[in-house]
Amino acid sequence: MSASDTSPVHRRMEQLAAAGIDVVRVTYPDLIGTERARDVLLDHLPSACDHGLAFCRAVYHTSPQGDTVDVAGGLDAGLPDIRVTPDLDTLTALPWEPGVATCLGDVTDPATGLPAPESPRDLLRAVLDRCAEHGLRPVVGPELEYFLCDETPDRPQGWRRYSDADGVVYTAGLRADRDNHLLRTLRLLRDLDIGVSGGNHEYDGSQFEINLTHGDAARAADRAFRFKSAIKELARKEGRLATFMAKPFNDAGGSGFHLHLSCVDAEGANVFADPAAPYGLSATARHALAGVLAHAPALSALANPTVNSYKRIGPDTLAPWLIDWGLDNRSAMVRVPPERGAGSRLELRLGDASANPYLLIAATLAAALLGILAREEPPAPLEGYGYDAARAEPLPATLSAALDALEADTALTETLGKDFTASYLAYKRDEVTRFQRHVTDWEFTEYAYHL
């Protein structure tokens, strides 16, 4: 037996073959958090690990409709490659695809050997390295909501809500879920081993929330990315559509992507806790909170990343509209849950479900780190029900305004990286331009008959 036959890759291949697996699906997130992938036959896994898998870099510049946006490093450079190398530490079997295992991939630029500038996973790693320089290890707990739809060819959009039941907030079972979608999905996600703990029906008909456990920020982002991909794949397997769109229906609320954030030190102690400090929050926690508030307009561009996102936000929506914070107050942009000690944390309620998990977490941590370094204190917490513009500044009301805020926030963009920021701004401004030129159903209904 040669040395190569006893390598970690070959040992892993033997384990996979023994489990009846003959295909490895290598996946990675694009700029908007959609899963890109290639299926690799097991016998070819060593080559994929040694040489990587070639993809066109313009995958990061491709719109949801398949158009290639003119972003520096793509069309202008002749559509060069990126290289994706399987990260076998993330390898797991797909419970709903017999014979298939999946793993994440690391993305590099073949010309430099460095991470690709648009790689969301590497952007988060870079921000975490900055946090580590200051002795901080962020802990994140993601919360995501989504809508489930049934195919309906006679509807203009081709889909309708899976259930229109009202008043079934925070329930489980057949009362709000006639086909046991949630129960079946929970069991499959448990077997995927991404840290799912439970779930329930949410506020609106056909809206669900499935909870992920908190943990190391990098792994939390991996788990949130895989969660979103799995939910969409499982819905397709049922002939349904699961959407993390911020606000898919006019007569329903939106779907959020809330982040619970704390930091621990090298010994694992929560550095946000200090029972003797104001609000029971340490200076580190208060400075982090101040940073998130200070950079909130720019943060919106990554937390609310679509034109549709800004239809979820507004007064009396339970989605943030103003830049504020409160103690156990769900009408604030940042809520501080009541737990203290080891449970001390901030809950950022700004993000919507369409956000790329890596970018949302990276930008939130960057803003918090900037606040910690600036050592500024937050304003007084919101008291009572929020949504009073006399008490706090409003968040950006459109994607275009949020992108302008991101470009103007040089401290945040330097932390995220100038190359990434330039690509993201170009890609998203193209989205705004395409939307502004598109004639919507609302416009035809509003004007065609009367004008």
Image: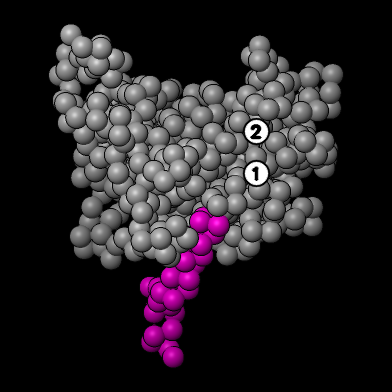
> Is residue 34 visible in the rendered structure shown here?
no
Q: Please, what is the three-letter code of the amino acid marked with disc 2?
A: Arg
Specify the segment rendered in magenta: 422-451
What amino acid type should be assigned to the residue bearing mark 1? Thr
Q: How many marks?
A: 2
Q: Is residue 55 left or right of residue 217?
A: left
Are the residues tagged 2 and 1 within 8 Å (C-beta)? yes
Q: Quadrant of the N terminus?
A: top left
Point out residue 361 in the picture as x, y percentages from the top left corner: 56, 38
- 128 drawn magenta: no
Residue 52 in picture, x, y percent from top left: 31, 36
* Mark 1, secondary structure of its residue: helix
Q: Is residue 359 visible?
A: yes
Q: Is 181 left, or right, of 406 in this rendering? A: left
Secondary structure state at the residue bearing disc 2: helix
Q: Main secondary structure of the magenta part?
A: helix
Nearest to the observer: residue 343 or residue 268: 268
Residue at image coords 38%, 73%: 441
Residue at 27% from the left image edge and 37% from the top image edge? 234
Q: For mark 2, does the 10 Å Cα neighbourhood hold few (<14), some (14 to 19), or many (20 or more) residues?
A: some
> Between marks 2 and 1, how big is the CA–CA gap?
8 Å
Q: Is residue 276 above or below residue 58?
A: above
Report the residue at 66% width, 11% height from top: 267
Name the residue beneath numbered marker 1.
415
Question: Which residue is label 2 attached to?
Answer: 130
